[in-house]
Image (cartoon, rainbow, N blue to C red):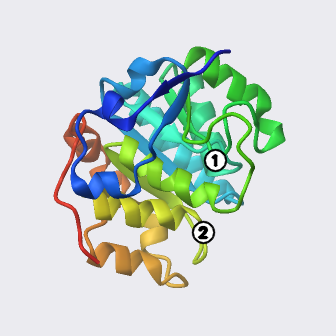
Amino acid sequence: MDSLEYTPEELLGPLNDVERRNAPSRLYLAGAVELLQRGSRVSVVGSRSASADSLSRTRLLVTSLAAHGITVVSGLAKGIDTAAHETAIREGGRTIAVLGTPLDKVYPKQNGELQRLIMWEHLAVSQFPPGYPSQKRNWPMRNRTMALLTDATVIVAAGEKSGTLHQGWEALRLGRLLFLMESVATDTTLSWPSEMIRYGAQVLSRDNLELFLEEIPERSRGEPVTF
């Protein structure tokens, strides 16, 4: 499938100075471009080696997002990302995959069929041009871009050194909404949740899920945070 090339401004409108700082110069898209031009988008992200409980929480959250017409965004990695994409598709919702590789590469390999399905029926996005090499730094860059492209980020599960934390901090820096699943926010073995909460992250639980779904504004841009 041929890809289309845009600047972030062409998709999102004018960027402020804070948004422009880590924004890629170009985005390469395959699929339904309109998913980045209308409606609300929520990133659902987390650990590649997720527990069965974390995967179950992911599926329940994404099912609710799809039922509310909210586009589910994730990074096509193993674990939480894969569960988020597959659940959105299964529930008749829409999903966007933001890749850490060019559109002409697949990572991980076992998600090749899922990537092709998303490129044809949903939307795949990369900031890396065809032929760009796979490097470790691609994934933190991808996470920061995902924060830029979405109205809110939900971290379902993540360890102390998880790449997902790059997205959480970037969402806060941009003034985007950031939510931590209650199970991770109350995990006493982790130090990062309390630090993110101190800077404005909110705890997402079964009790406030409906309120969360109702209050996500279209194309939300709040006040950025200075660290």
Q: Earlier in the sequence, mark 1 or mark 2?
A: 1
The percent position of residue 24, horizontal first and vertical second, equals 45, 46
Q: Secondary structure at mark 2?
A: loop
Looking at the image, which residue sits at the far right? 109
- Judged left or right of residue 225, residue 41 is right
Q: Amino acid at mark 1?
A: Gly
Figure quadrant of the C terminus: bottom left
Q: Looking at the image, which residue is at 23% across and 45% down? A: 211
Q: Looking at the image, which residue is at 49% across and 84% down? A: 188
In the image, residue 37 sits, relative to residue 213, either above or below, namely above
Q: Looking at the image, which residue is at 42% across and 75% down? A: 193
The percent position of residue 198, horizontal first and vertical second, equals 28, 78
- Judged left or right of residue 149, residue 30 is right
One can see residue 207 in this view: no
Q: Which residue is mark 2?
A: 162
Tell me which corner region of the image, top left, top right, bottom left or bottom right, holds residue 185: bottom left
In the image, residue 107 sits, relative to residue 53, either above or below, namely above
Tell me which corner region of the image, top left, top right, bottom left or bottom right, holds residue 31: top right
Of residue 20 and residue 88, the one placed in the foreground of this image is: 20
Of residue 49 and residue 164, the one placed in the foreground of this image is: 164
Looking at the image, which residue sits at the far left? 223
Q: Which residue is mark 1?
A: 100
Q: Amino acid at mark 2?
A: Ser
Q: Secondary structure at mark 1?
A: loop
How far is disc 1 from disc 2 in space, using C-alphas?
15 Å
Figure quadrant of the N terminus: top right
